[in-house]
Amino acid sequence: MKDRIISVDIFRGLTIALMILVNTPGTWEYVFPPLRHAEWHGYTPTDLVFPFFLFIVGTSIVFAYRNKEPNSATYRKISVRTLKLLGLGLFLGAFTISFPFIKDFAEIRFPGVLQRIGVVFFFAAVLFLNFNWKVILGITIAILVGYWVWLGYIPLNGETPTFERAPNNWANFVDLQVFGTHMYKEDYDPEGLLSTFPSIASSLLGIFTGLILISQRAKKELLLLLLGILMLLLGYIWDLAFPINKALWSSSFVLVTAGWANIFLALIYYLTDVKGIQFGSIFKYTGANAITVYFLSSFVTKLFYSIQVEEGLSLHGWIYKNIYVHSFLSGELSSLLYGLSVMGFYLLLALFMYRRKIFIKV
């Protein structure tokens, strides 16, 4: 079997490219509905992107650690990577363009995308190193069922808990108590503390996909497809009792997003690794420096929003207004073209880094 599974690299890079696209519209006022997050319950294509990345983190763990021993050297490597991700995430949350370049402490957001990736990677890697697939499956089920029971059935301050955005929602309540003002929203954080537990399950489901890909079984793409369909069905059934919700990272959301991840990965695997069709190389190059590209895009975007070109107009707004806004284009299309340009720039940067053999491991 080949050392590299091309489809995994493509899937990882494609996910990062989509993360950049949905995070950098020309203006948040005009965004096509599929490129917006769901308001609360339900999901859009945009809501698939982050769980896809956590899923592929689990798959990649299988390739990176299948021959590693659970010893101090391995744990040190895992811990260092986790701390790097946490540090980069906290830096993005704390940085400001004005001296002393750090926000007031009360304004710093503690949770975040990179922080969640770091925590999920740590626990998924440690579990993979120490347990077989049966135990990991049991842990995954326990997390998903336990989270459902906690949010749906344990009274909160004497009140019946809810899955709605309300004070008696356990996930929102815990985030507010732990993080206070250090959150994305006043009452909750989409990368909050309690919802991190089921996000670990997203990565653990990716581990099962990785185990299938390194196995010697035939028709792996068919197994992944069937597994994806099964997860989708289970997720939609569970949605009746525990709504699909990204902000809560509900258990039904975990299953539905993992289902779609398996289906898309099965298709890419069949085309590239089975049929040998050459496509998506640019995403493979992006996947080789995935975290670096994502961090740079997030940092530069923050700079563009912070640098004021004229009164009330940031560098981001100036570029968008003077290059992308035209009377013959709708606001949504202008906004999308800006996002596609940003995404294209980072894809080309990833290509340049790949050809120069620049690989920054985070």
Image (cartoon, rainbow, N blue to C red):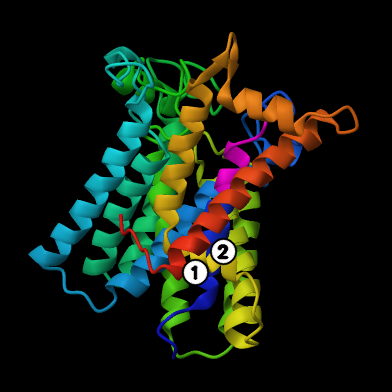
Indicate whether residue 22 is drawn in magenta.
yes
| 292 to the left or right of 76 | right
**Residue visible at 27% across and 53% down?**
122
| x then y, percent, for residue 309 | 56, 18
| x then y, percent, for residue 64 | 31, 71
Query: Is 143 located above or below residue 138 in the figure?
Result: above
Please report whichever mark, 1 or 2, sits nearer to the chain's N-terminal start. 1
Residue 243 can be seen in this image: no
**SS under mark 2:** helix
Per the rendering, the mark at residue 283 is 2
Mark 1 crowdedness (10 Å alpha carbons): few <14, some 14-19, many ≥20? many
Quarter of the image for the C terminus: give it: bottom left
Quarter of the image for the N terminus: give it: bottom left
**Residue visible at 62% across and 86% down?**
276
| x then y, percent, for residue 269 | 59, 77
| Residue nearest the observer in this picture, 198 or 99 | 99
- Range of magenta residues: 19-26
The majority secondary structure of the magenta stretch comes to: helix
Kind of residue sitting beneath label 2: Phe
| x then y, percent, for residue 180 | 34, 16
Q: Nearer the viewer, mark 1 or mark 2?
A: 2
**SS under mark 1:** helix
| 323 to the left or right of 98 | right
- Label 1 and label 2: CA atoms lie apart by 7 Å
Residue 137 can be seen in this image: yes
Mark 1 — residue? Answer: 9
Query: Is 3 located above or below residue 316 in the figure?
Result: below
| 332 to the left or right of 360 | right
Mark 2 crowdedness (10 Å alpha carbons): few <14, some 14-19, many ≥20? many
